[in-house]
Image (tube, helix red, strand yellow):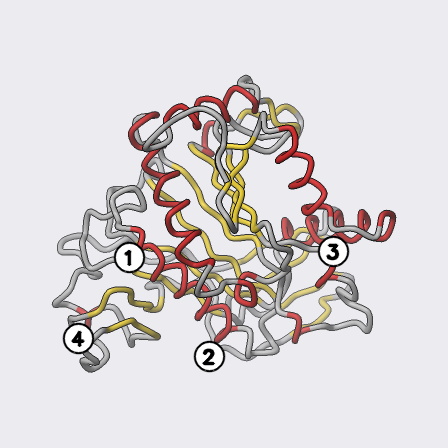
């Protein structure tokens, strides 16, 4: 049986599991016409209402083939002497972003990209109905080294614990709020927009910026200018198209100005607030946390010394280069 084991010296969880099956080869499982090969369809957007597991979709969600976490498993928490173990109940899903095999976020129309963003929301809403799921990660890799080109998809990973990076972000945001009674991210937005040096683009609803302590060249965060801790509670009919246009332009700038590098996109949003274990868990999270997207081009090239990231390109330089490469014009950020 697969299991999550906790390292008590570092607070890290490690998934123990048998080696998975090798990746499939041959025809793509996610192109239209072979829907029955992907496993039962979880969700899809279709204009004309054809039956599930048939062509005619624009965005489709299917179970991951070699899933790390499974919804059908029973959640068991137990102590093994001084150690902690949890069964990996959760979900591993793929959001197939387009019927076209060679699409990327740089080639998709903003309207198609917006549909993907709404599916992110739908999956968060659906999975957070399950009180045994504590945290959900939505991520996307483009051109991962060692992985052959494949149909475009985002990955949804829902788990019965809180991801370590989420836990650290929540702690820092909570401690800042306890001291200043203000949101850390809102304060950061005000300062960055005022200074402009690291702002790449401003829209009515969002800001794209290179963070002050960027870990790698071209690392970019996209934050809503209106405070909100949960992506699914904040995305609106008026802000969805704005975010889709911003992402479309950003990824076109990466592709055209920097040779279409690989990247990792991660949605940082509040965990499942229905799954509080201790009274007082996340008591101020609606005020202290602020959802955002983080995009790290070529994360495999990140340089670290003893856990400290080393970035040889100043964030101000990266921001200027991104503004210069932005489709339709360069110069100062607009908003």
Q: Which label's residue is closer to the chain start, 2 or 4? A: 4
**Outermost residue to the top:** 312
Dot 1 falls on a residue whose secondary structure is helix
Mark nearer the N terminus (3 vs 2): 2
**Disc 3: which residue:** 288
Front label number (3 vs 4): 3
Secondary structure beneath dot 4 equals loop
Query: Label 3, label 2: how many angstroms apart (C-alpha)?
Result: 34 Å
Front residue of 111 and 231: 111
**Left or right: where does residue 225 sit relative to residue 265?**
right
Label 1 crowd (10 A; few <14 / some 14-19 / many >=20): some
The residues bearing labels 2 and 1 have C-alpha atoms spaced at a distance of: 32 Å
**Could you say whether the residue bearing mark 2 is in a helix, strand or loop?**
loop
Quadrant assignment, res 238: bottom left
Q: Which mark is residue 317?
A: none
* Residue that carries the numbered disc 4 in the rendered image: 54
How many numbered discs sit on the rendered protein?
4
Percent of width and height locating residue 116: 35, 60
Q: Are marks 3 and 4 in contact (CB under 8 Å)?
A: no
Proximity of marks 4 and 1: CB atoms separated by less than 8 Å: no
Q: Which residue is mark 2?
A: 72
Which of discs 2 and 1 lies nearer the camera? The answer is 1
x, y (%) of residue 171?
75, 51
* Residue drawn at the location 56% of the way across and 53% of the way down: 268
Identify the residue at image location x=51%, y=28%.
Answer: 302
- Direction right: furthest residue: 179
| CA separation in Å, label 4 and label 1 | 19 Å
Q: Is residue 128 above or below residue 98?
A: below
């Amino acid at each position: 049986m697969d299991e999550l084991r906790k390292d008590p010296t570092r607070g890290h969880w490690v998934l123990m599991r048998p080696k998975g099956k090798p990746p499939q080869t041959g025809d793509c499982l996610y192109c239209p016409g072979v829907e029955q090969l992907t496993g039962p369809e979880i969700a899809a957007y279709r204009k004309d209402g054809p039956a599930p597991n048939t062509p005619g979709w624009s965005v489709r969600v299917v179970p991951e083939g070699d899933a790390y976490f499974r919804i059908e498993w029973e959640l068991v928490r137990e102590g093994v002497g001084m150690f902690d173990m949890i069964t990996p109940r959760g979900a591993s899903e793929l959001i197939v972003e387009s019927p076209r095999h060679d699409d990327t976020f740089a080639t998709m129309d903003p309207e198609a990209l917006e549909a993907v963003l709404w599916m992110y929301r739908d999956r968060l809403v659906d999975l957070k109905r399950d009180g045994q799921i504590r945290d959900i990660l939505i991520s996307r890799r483009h051109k991962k080294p060692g992985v052959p080109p494949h149909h475009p998809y985002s990955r949804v990973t829902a788990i019965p614990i809180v991801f370590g990076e989420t836990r650290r972000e929540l702690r820092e945001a909570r401690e800042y709020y306890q001291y200043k009674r203000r949101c850390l991210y809102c304060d950061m937005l005000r300062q960055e927009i005022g200074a402009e040096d690291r702002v790449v683009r401003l829209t009515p609803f969002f800001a794209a910026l290179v963070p002050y302590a960027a870990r790698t060249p071209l690392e970019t965060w996209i934050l809503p200018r209106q405070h909100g801790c949960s992506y699914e509670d904040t995305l609106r009919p008026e802000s969805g198209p704005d975010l889709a246009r911003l992402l479309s332009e950003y990824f076109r700038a990466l592709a055209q100005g920097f040779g279409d590098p690989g990247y990792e996109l991660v949605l940082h949003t509040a965990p499942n607030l229905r799954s509080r274990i201790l009274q007082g868990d996340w008591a101020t999270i609606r005020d202290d946390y602020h959802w955002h997207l983080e995009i790290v081009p070529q994360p495999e090239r990140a340089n670290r010394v003893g856990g400290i990231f080393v970035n040889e390109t100043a964030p101000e330089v990266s921001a200027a280069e991104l503004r210069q490469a932005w489709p339709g014009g360069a110069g100062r950020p607009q908003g």
